[in-house]
Image (cartoon, helix red, strand yellow):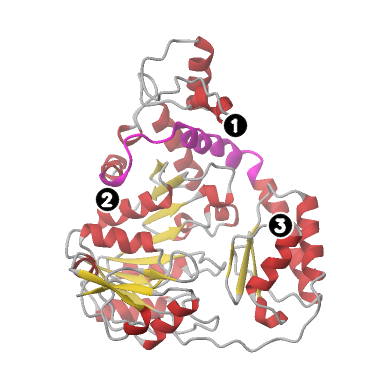
Amino acid sequence: MESPLRQYLEKLHNSRRARFHMPGHKGRGTLSPFDAACPYDITEIAGADSLFEASGILAQGEEATARLYGSKATLWSAGGSTLCIQAMLALVCREGDLVLAVRNAHHAFAHAAILLGVRVRWMLPQNRDRGGLYGAVTPGEVEQMLKQYPQAKAVWVTTPDYLGGMADVKGLARVCHQRGVKLLVDNAHGAYLLYTHRHPMQLGADLCCDSPHKTLPVLTGGAWLHLSHQVPYTADQARQAMKLFGSTSPSYLILLSLEDCNGYLAGPGKEEFARLYQTVRAMRQRLEKQGVALLPMEGDYAKLTLDAPAMGYTGKEITGYLDSQKMDWEYADDRFVVLMLSPSNTPQELAALEQALVSLPKREPTAQEQVPYSLPPQRMELRQAYFAPKEEVPIGQAVGRISAAAQSCCPPGVPVVMPGEEITPQVQKLLQKSGKISLDVVQ
């Protein structure tokens, strides 16, 4: 696959031209390991294209990504999926418009809605057998919400979720399109699902963001915004939406890694992920036979999510043990431990992980108190509450007050209370458990 950005940067580096432009290091880093990267760290000089007005080498790279995913257009982001989330809402909504969103949405979605003045009504899946906010909303549940809120402009879904659960995107798309509503998908954890034909662009989503840096060989902050063939928006309109929020100085190192990822996806990626699938599937079978409790794979096979109490542990006890084995993890709380795998993990690392998990001393399962979660009463709109006069109060005095901020405990980024919602005893207990001692509330 052609690599016009890499070719341009290599040519620039080899030309030894004097750089009288940003950045200040002039391509000559002095501190390891940045010295090797500095020659390729440039700004939007002549020939380098400009991300939010892309018409040259960056546009060629974006078009190659779009062909890989079958989208009408794919835009690159050096600001993570956060920038793509902001752009999706800006494309679809105007101030005062209503969006239906599953509550496991990342707080970046809530903050984008606040900035744009978008109203949100939240959905909780009826089947939340994993406790808290976990579980996938069904097409039938979305259809009922659309009947209740026929003025909704879009439905927002996060899939895969942080623990690896996946929603029925094809069914959700069918319901949304029958009612003329856009389906927007935060697929930050699922860029690699292209290979299993479970990517939202293959299942009917209208707009979708990916964070390839989470699962593919891309530098942190690299992301994609996909536009489906059925939406009326153009690539230029999407760029303008991204320009509203994005930095005018995107990292060319991140952009180069996104271009290199095109070659990876079209080349060795398919075989490497097929091998990872088989490896993880066999590993899961062996682990479960040895009493290691895992959440079902459900399609996001790049995650191993441990159910610690089912093994007689807390999540933090397990991660303490992993730490002693010189292993790091993605996330842990009292109940869950999330381990993210990729083809870049060596066979030796995967074997060592399996050995570590089966070597945990066997214990009887423990019953863990699950704070029942229900949506707090909404007293104000997101934007209204966020910009209202506020004060900080001890969490012990917060029940009955209206939250002025999105407050998260677990998983990271998923708020248990949003601006404008009443702080209930359930919310108070969840936040206390996560270590919160004070909250911002509306005066």
Residue drawn 64% across and 47% down?
A: 270
The kind of residue tagged 2 is Pro
Q: Is residue 442 above or below residue 65?
A: below
Q: Pick whichever of labels 1 and 2 is earlier in the sequence.
A: 1
Residue nearest the viewer, comparing 205 with 94: 94
Q: Could you tell which of marks 3 and 2 lies nearer the N-terminus? A: 2
Q: Element type at marker 1?
A: loop
Q: Image check: 321 left or right of 436? A: right
On the rendered structure, is 338 left or right of 374? Answer: right
The kind of secondary structure the magenta stretch mainly shows is helix
Label drawn at residue 232 = 2
- Give the CA distance from mark 1 to mark 3: 23 Å
> Where in the figure is residue 287, as x and y percent of width and height?
77, 70
Question: Foreground mark, 1 or 2?
Answer: 1
The x and y percentages for residue 123 are 36, 77
Report which residue position mark 3 lands on. 327
Magenta stretch: includes residue 261: yes
